Amino acid sequence: MTPTASTVFDTDTASTPAGEHRYALELSDRWATTVGGPLNGGYLLATALRALQREVPHPDLLVASAHYLRPGTSGPAAITTETARVGRRTATGQATLTRQNREILRVLATFTDLTQHRGATHTSNTPPELPAPEQCLDPFAEIGSPGTTIAQQVQYRTPRIPGFFHGTPGGTTNAEFWMRFSDGRDPDPLALALLVDAAAPVVFDLGAVGSSTIELTVNIRHRPAPGWLACRVRTDYLTNGLHDEDFEIWDSTGILVAQSRQLALIPE
């Protein structure tokens, strides 16, 4: 399925002009991390990036760095944008997402045309070695309703179910799995900014019961091909309740299309 206004992602990240460099939108509860709880950070980021994309001439997200000031909840919200520089190959701007006059998210992002980039290329890593998606397990089918609405919008397939899904954390801080939108929407650079944050944090397998993103940086390497996305995630350091998380997304042709790193806080 190609991106259209009828897909959940496109509908729920859409905003309408509400003045100069200002947009209005309705944050949807379909992307909550818990029922009735805060919204997923990748979803919030995608709403701000989609508004900013309207202000620059280049079509593809290249890099974004988002700082989360407080949790986002569903309901009316506003985005303000500012363009910092427009060049021949890249354009940079910032966007701020607010709800009830409180700032939720501030992001600085650069856009480009990924099809026009040429130059030296070297890759020292390889895609995750996974069985075909139809040979893998659906973790949420195994455990029933997860109590999170984002799990209804994104599908996951994994060779094994991590212990924390069954309430018995196994101490593993890395994972490889498949992911895609549930309604069949094909991925694109803007969607990748959501998807790098759409999986359960691997620190849950250390016994953590929550994780709140403080800062998230995402790099887009290529426009992704249609189909399932192979994902690799790991956490190397958990220190005084703060943890990193590195995420890779490889498309159905075996090309690395996105990387991210975030710093997040485990609640006391």
Image (spheres, helix red, strand yellow):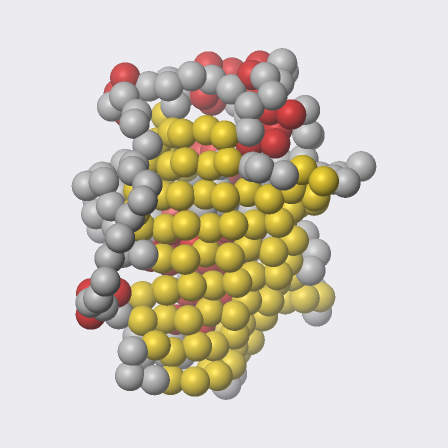
List x then y, in percent, for residue 17: 46, 76
Pick the residue in front: 230 or 227.
230
Q: Is residue 238 above or below residue 97?
A: above
On the image, the x and y values in percent for residue 119 come to: 21, 66
Where on the picture, by quarter, is residue 209? Answer: top right
Drawn side of residue 232 relative to residue 168, left or right: left
| Tally of numbered tags | 0
Image quarter hosting the N terminus: top left
Q: Residue at x 64, y 58 (%)?
A: 68
- Does residue 170 appear in this view? yes
For the point 59% across and 17% down, which residue is it? 170
Residue at the extreme right of the image, as rendered: 268
128 w.r.t. 137: above or below:
below
Instruction: State the image coordinates of residue 132 (x, y, percent, origin top left).
Output: 25, 23
- Residue found at x 26% / y 70%: 113
In this rendering, position of residue 27 left or right of residue 186: right
Q: Position of residue 93 (x, y in %)?
A: 47, 77
Relative to 151, say whether 75 is above or below.
below
Viewer-proximal residue among 245 and 193: 245
Question: Does 173 sit left or right of 104 as displayed?
Answer: left
